[in-house]
Image (cartoon, rainbow, N blue to C red):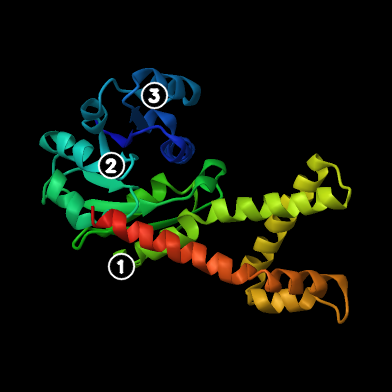
Amino acid sequence: MLKKAAFIGTGNMGGALIRAACRAVGPDQVVIADYLYEKAQALAEELGCTAARTNGEAAGAASYVFLCVKPQVLPEVARALAPGLTAGQAVVSIAAGIRTDAIRAWVGQEVPVLRVMPNTCAAIGQGMLALTAAPGVAEVHFGAVEEILSRAGRVERISEGLMDQFTAVAGCGPAYVYQFIEALADGGVMTGLPRREAQIYAAQTVLGAAAMVLESGEHPGALKDAVCSPGGSTIAGVAALERRAFRSAAIEAVLAAYEKNVSLGKG
């Protein structure tokens, strides 16, 4: 009997999704493979799932085959798996910029193909993930992938035409936020706070602010205004960010990431 999910690739993102899948469907339903078998074996021993010696062995053992490899090696990996795949399986790619029609051409037209774009926060179950699929993919496949990834964070279905945009915001976004947390902590250190405490204060503040946006439903600008007392220290800090084009820099970062995603899809 086939296991629920196979994961090809155990890097940072693959490893995060493997951990989430083991929590969601049980380690006995997960098989993993990596070009370094020892790496897959070590992770399997930690989580209680199964390590396969080859990609083909892993793919042949599960209903849903997750391709957690870099975009530049995805064509080679997908083509190598194609002869062993059947219409009863489904392939799920996490590679940025590579569309489902290209993946279908590599794995075979009869195999359902889906795409997931996660972010690194999936490692602690707080990820933001987008899910899309090639035309004609059945609802049962969407539901199964959502189940497998349910412990990775929030999963949203979107049209494939928005995947590059999503990736630029949510896939790349943690890096932008980490930079902001680092800078906020650096500012605290400059004022005299110890480094450890400054980092904790900065990270918890970002965590709390994000939760306020999600839970209150308020526009971030309105929440910002509520913190800024007339003539106070907060509006002075906000004005300093505006002078340094803080928002413009964030927008430009998203646009640069989006353009890179588009170029990856063009090969």
Return the residue found at the far bottom.
Answer: 230
Residue most toward the top? 38
Location of mark 3 (residue): 40
Identify the residue at image location x=62%, y=66%. 214
Residue at the (39%, 24%) spot, across then down: 40
Question: Would you place residue 209 above or below residue 30 in this image?
Answer: below
Task: State how many labels appear.
Answer: 3
Q: CA distance from mark 2 to mark 3?
A: 18 Å
Q: Position of residue 10 (x, y in %)?
A: 40, 32
In primary-sequence order, the first of circles 2 and 3 is 3
Seen from the viewer's position, the closer of residues 250 and 47 is 250
Q: Which residue is mark 2?
A: 64
Residue depth check, mark 2 versus mark 3: number of the one nearer the observer: 3
Quick check: 198 left or right of 1?
Answer: right
Q: In front: mark 2 or mark 1?
A: 1
- Name the disc covering residue 22, or none: none
- Name the residue rendered at 26%, 35% in the picture: 62
* Secondary structure state at the residue bearing disc 2: strand
Where does the N terminus fall, quadrant-wise?
A: top left
Q: What amino acid is at disc 1?
A: Gly
158 sits left or right of 98 in the view: right
Q: CA distance from mark 3 to mark 1?
A: 33 Å
What SS does tag 3 mark?
helix
Disc on res. 161: 1
- Can you give x and y, in whole percent of width and height, for residue 208 in the image? 72, 59
Residue 189 visible in the displayed image = yes
Of 47 and 74, the residue lying toward us: 74
Q: How many angstroms separate mark 2 from mark 1 (CA)?
A: 23 Å
Inspect this view and state whether residue 157 appears: no
Name which residue type carries label 3. Ala
Q: Earlier in the sequence, mark 2 or mark 1?
A: 2
